[in-house]
Amino acid sequence: MRGPLVAVLFFIITPMLIFFQWVLRKLNAPGWGTIGVRYYSALCTALRLRVRVVGEPVRDRAVLFVSNHVSWADILVIGSIAPIAYVSKSEIGNWPLVGTAAKSQRTIFVDRSRRQQTGDAIADIVDRLANGTSVVLFAEGTSSDGNRVLPFRSALIGAVREAAARSERGILIQPMSICYTGLNGIPMGRQHRPTVAWYGDLDFMPHISALIARGAIDAVVSYGEPVAADASSDRKVLAKTLEGAVRKITAATLTGRTHPARAHS
C-alpha cells in the first residue's frame, strides 16, 4: 500500500509546487527556496529517506556545489537541506510533470552532446549564482553504484572555470558528498548500496517501487572546505582537487570513519 500512497502524495504536492513557484515568479516575490526545501523534505519523509548532514554548506552567498552522484534520490535528499538549483541532462526537462517541477526549481538543462548547449548552461550557472541561487553540479557526469566516486569530467570542471571567468568576483566552489549508509537502521554493506543507486540502464518505475518496499534509507550529505575559483584556475588541477576532496569524504563516510566536521541532523 505504501507505493500508491507515495504516488498520490507526489501527484498532489507537485502541481502545488509548480503553481506556487509560478505565482512567486510572476510577482517577483521571494520564497521559492523555502517552498522547494519543504517540497523535497515532504518527499523524503514519504519515501523514508532519513537525511543526516555532516559539515556546513555555505549559506551566506551563492555557491557552486560539486558532488558525486548515486541516485535520483540525491535530488530529494540534497534539496531538503537548503535552497538549490541543479544542472541536469536535457531529457529530464521533457518528463511529464517531473520536467515542469524541475523547471520551476530553476534547474539548468544541458545537452552535453551539443557544444552550444553547454555554453548556454554555463551562462545559466553564472546567472543563477549572480542572483543568489546556489547550484549543484554532479561532476562525474553520470551516477555510480554508490560504492565509489567515478572520475570527474574535466570538461565539466572546465565549464566551472569558464563560469568563474564570466563572474565579476569569481565563484566559490564547495565539494559535497552524498552516501547511502543504512537500511532500516542497519549499516548498509557494499552489496546493498547498488540497490539504492540508480545507474546504468535501470528502469525508473521498478527501481522506485523496490526502494519504497525496502524501508527506511539513511542518507549522509557531507560538505568539504570551499575552494575559490576565478579565470586563472587550471581546469585539470581544479578537477583533481575537487575529485580528491569528494573521494576522501565519501570513503570516510562509507567506512564509518569520523569526518572532521561536526555532524548534525
Image: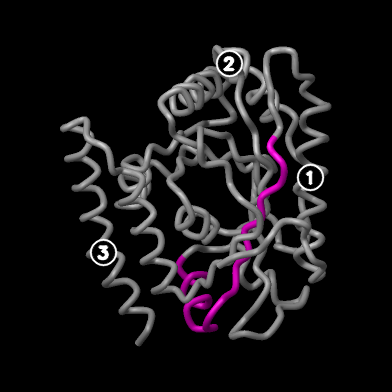
Q: Is residue 130 left or right of residue 54?
A: left
Labels 3 & 2 near each other (Cβ < 8 A): no
**Residue 6, placed above or below residue 142:** below
Spatial distance from mark 1 to mark 3, Cα to Cα?
38 Å
Q: Which residue is mark 3?
A: 11
Image: magenta residue range: 205-226
Q: Which residue is mark 1?
A: 245
Residue in the picture at 40% in, 59% down:
40
Q: Which residue is mark 2?
A: 169
**Residue 78, placed above or below residue 217:** above
Residue in the picture at 32% in, 71% down:
7
* Foreground disc of the pair 1, 2: 2
For the residue marked with disc 2, what is the amino acid? Answer: Arg
Q: Is residue 192 left or right of residue 203?
A: right
Q: Which quadrant of the view contains residue 161?
A: top right
Residue in the picture at 83% in, 35% down:
240
Camera-side residue of 229 and 85: 229
Dot 1 falls on a residue whose secondary structure is helix
For the residue marked with disc 1, what is the amino acid? Answer: Ala
Q: Which quadrant of the view contains residue 233?
A: top right
Q: Is residue 217 left or right of residue 243?
A: left
Spatial distance from mark 3 to mark 2, Cα to Cα?
42 Å
* Foreground disc of the pair 3, 2: 2
Camera-side residue of 243 and 223: 223
